Image (cartoon, rainbow, N blue to C red):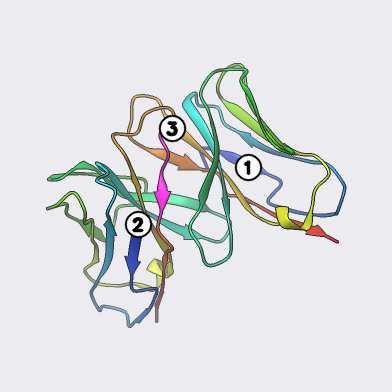
Amino acid sequence: NAGVTQTPKFQVLKTGQSMTLQCAQDMNHEYMSWYRQDPGMGLRLIHYSVGAGITDQGEVPNGYNVSRSTTEDFPLRLLSAAPSQTSVYFCASSYSRLRRADTQYFGPGTRLTVL
Amino acid sequence: TQLLEQSPQFLSIQEGENLTVYCNSSSVFSSLQWYRQEPGEGPVLLVTVVTGGEVKKLKRLTFQFGDARKDSSLHITAAQPGDTGLYLCAGLIQGAQKLVFGQGTRLTINP
């Protein structure tokens, strides 16, 4: 198993450009989520999904869109990038809907810079 | 405002010393997790505590969940350079499918 994979690993955008961060998992996990990590802020939840066709907002959803057409993939779209979206983005997955003792598996991250 | 306050944010100590990292909130959590993150990688789960008052040990690391399930601590005994890293606590909000993270503690153990 490859676990959780993310592409690209690094990306530089100009303000106003759009892009999609890819996330895939091969563990047949129902729950997938996107976080951003900024210095001194820990990880903040952007969007999450409890299964194919179901998504919901996290703490900081503005400026980001998601969809979940398959169990394996959970892409994160930036429609019009802003410098405030410069961050490291992590995708994570869990076997089922988050329960008390569930383990979340994180991908290696995408480092995004918006100029 | 951070839902989970983690302290200290930075800690640099000598090899062999003991240390404690704290994670506090005014909210009740269904469970609380501790992760460790290396540079350039995603967080990796160390432990999950689910019962108020629960204590779990992982070699030299001791994790405790507060009786009211609002706070937690991580104690490391006889720290080693290999313990260096970013430690994150995360709480599962009751009734929601959301994990909230503390700011993290960047720990450096000097030989």
Q: Secondary structure at mark 2?
A: strand
Give the Cα distance between marks 2 and 1: 27 Å
Q: Is residue A104 above or below residue B67?
A: below
The amino acid marked with disc number 1 is Gln
Same chain, marks 2 and 1?
Answer: no
Label 2 is placed on what type of residue? Val
Left or right: B42 as drawn, with respect to A96 = right
Left or right: B1 in relation to A45: right
Q: Secondary structure at mark 3?
A: strand
Up/down of B94 relative to B80, above or below:
above
Magenta region, residue range:
A102-106
Q: Which mark is residue B92?
A: 3
Q: In the picture, which quadrant includes the N terminus of chain A?
A: bottom left
Residue at image x 83%, y 42%? B18
Choose between B1 and A33: the one closer to the eye.
Answer: A33
Please name the residue that numbered disc 2 is placed on.
Answer: A4
> Which label is found at residue B21?
none
Asked whether B25 or A43 is in front, the reply is: A43
Q: Are marks 2 and 1 in contact (CB under 8 Å)?
A: no
Q: Where residue A103 sits: x, y (%)?
A: 42, 39
Q: Locate the C terminus of chain A and report the quarter of the image it occupies.
A: bottom left
Query: Which residue carries the number 1 mark?
Result: B6
Residue B91: x, y in percent?
49, 34
10 Å crowding of disc 1: few (<14), some (14-19), many (20+): many
Question: What residue is shown at x 51% (from left), y 50% (from top)?
Answer: B44
Q: Tell me which secondary structure the magenta stretch mostly adopts.
A: loop
Amino acid at pointer 3: Leu
Q: Is residue A62 left or right of residue B110?
A: left
